Amino acid sequence: MSRVRLLHLVRVFAWTGLTSLGGGRSAYFHDAVVVRRPWVRNDEFVQDLTLSQLLPGPNFANLAVALGCRLAGWAGGAGALGAIVAPGAVILLLLAVVYFRGGFAPGTTHVMHGMAATVVGLVLVTTARIVRASLHGRVALVVAVATFLLVGPLGVNTPLAIALVLPVALWWHRPRRA
Amino acid sequence: MMAGLARLAWTFLWLSPLCVGGGLGVVPEMQRQVVARYEWVTAREFVDGYTLSQLTPGPNMLVVVFVGYRAYGVPGACLAGLAMFLPTSSLTALVARRWERVRAHPWALAGERALAPVGIGLMAAGVYTLARSAVHDAPTAALALVATLALTASWVPPVTVVLVGGLAGWLLGL
């Protein structure tokens, strides 16, 4: 039972993927499938967004897959993944070829250094926004800071750090009887 | 070559589920693996690849294509992309179709609440890792600060800010 024809889905997702540059990419999807087209209800979208963030893996891809499955079953999920990953992958591959062959014009090193420094500002702002929106309570703060210190400055292997921190957080939020 | 490709695929395969709450969270571990451990790219190339992935449409984790290409050419790029996206996406598809039932489980909510701060900590560590490679003197620090302020104070498209940063880097000869 698919709500949308596969080809139409792939076209819309590919276009959404190509035009959603920079931060807040899920907002572009919301616009494409909830606001502009009557494909997905708002509560369904929120559900898929939560799922995509909860499950492991790159969550922009997860969101596309969850929405794709909802709209056109397994084929929809596969089509959605291909539609958002393939165009960017081809572009980045071409950029990599040029970059490693030294084909960037002289002076490009300076441009790259400048862009890399601004990207630090960009990821800092994105992280700060998420901290403000979803870091509530002292326990959550302790868990976040501990994870940061372990993985960042202390250089602990990430799976090990998660294995140390996550059980504590899970135990704290364990289901309790009302 | 075959052993190398297998190592590449395996590395991105186990890195992909570490993207908890966003691709940024996996950056510290990815850098450790691809720069320090296997030396597929240098620290400078890694941060440049991440920067290019920010300018490219699609998920940021496409940086694996960049690393894979450097390590083993086009086959490396394809394999890295498949290893990063295919298994976790399959899991998402499986769970998405059963989500109504999974969500009703009391531990699902506990998992959601417990994972959120872990993901935030990982993202912060990702910022730290990128900053260590990209901010190395006063001008780059100033540029990062100006970008932070510009993006906080007003709604400027992030891509514009990054491109202006590139122009500034060129003018200043960073």
Image (cartoon, coloured by chain):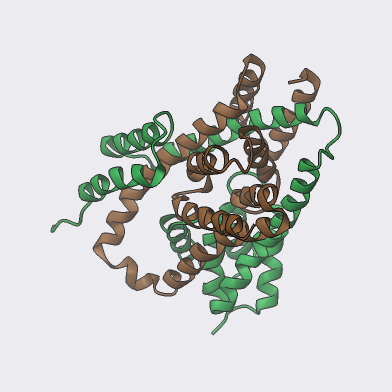
Spot the residue most to the bottom. Answer: A1
Is A136 positioned to the left or the right of B82 in the image? left
Is B113 positioned to the left or the right of B19 in the image? left
Residue for point 65% across, 21% down: B140
Residue for point 76% across, 29% down: A109
Q: Quadrant of residue A120?
A: top right
- Name the one closer to the observer, A99 or A20: A99
Question: How far across and down, in percent of the image, does residue B28 sit?
Answer: 49, 39
- Name the one closer to the observer, A141 or A12: A141
Question: How far across and down, in percent of the image, does residue A124 sit?
Answer: 53, 32
Spot the residue most to the top. Answer: B138
Residue B16 lies, with reference to residue A73, above or below; the image says above
Residue for point 70% across, 55% down: A88
Residue A53 lies, with reference to residue A131, above or below; the image says below
Is A170 positioned to the left or the right of B145 in the image? left
- Name the one closer to the observer, A32 or A6: A6
Q: Quadrant of residue A101?
A: top right
Q: In which quadrant is the N terminus of chain B drawn?
A: bottom right
| Residue A58 visible in image | no
Question: How far across and down, in percent of the image, does residue A118 sit?
Answer: 65, 30
Q: Which chain is brown?
A: B
Q: Which chain is green?
A: A
How many numbered marks appear?
0
Is B123 positioned to the left or the right of B68 in the image? left
Residue B9 lies, with reference to residue B139, above or below; the image says below
Residue A47 lies, with reference to residue B129, above or below; the image says below
Q: In which quadrant is the C terminus of chain B drawn?
A: top right
Question: How far across and down, in percent of the image, does residue A111 sit?
Answer: 76, 29
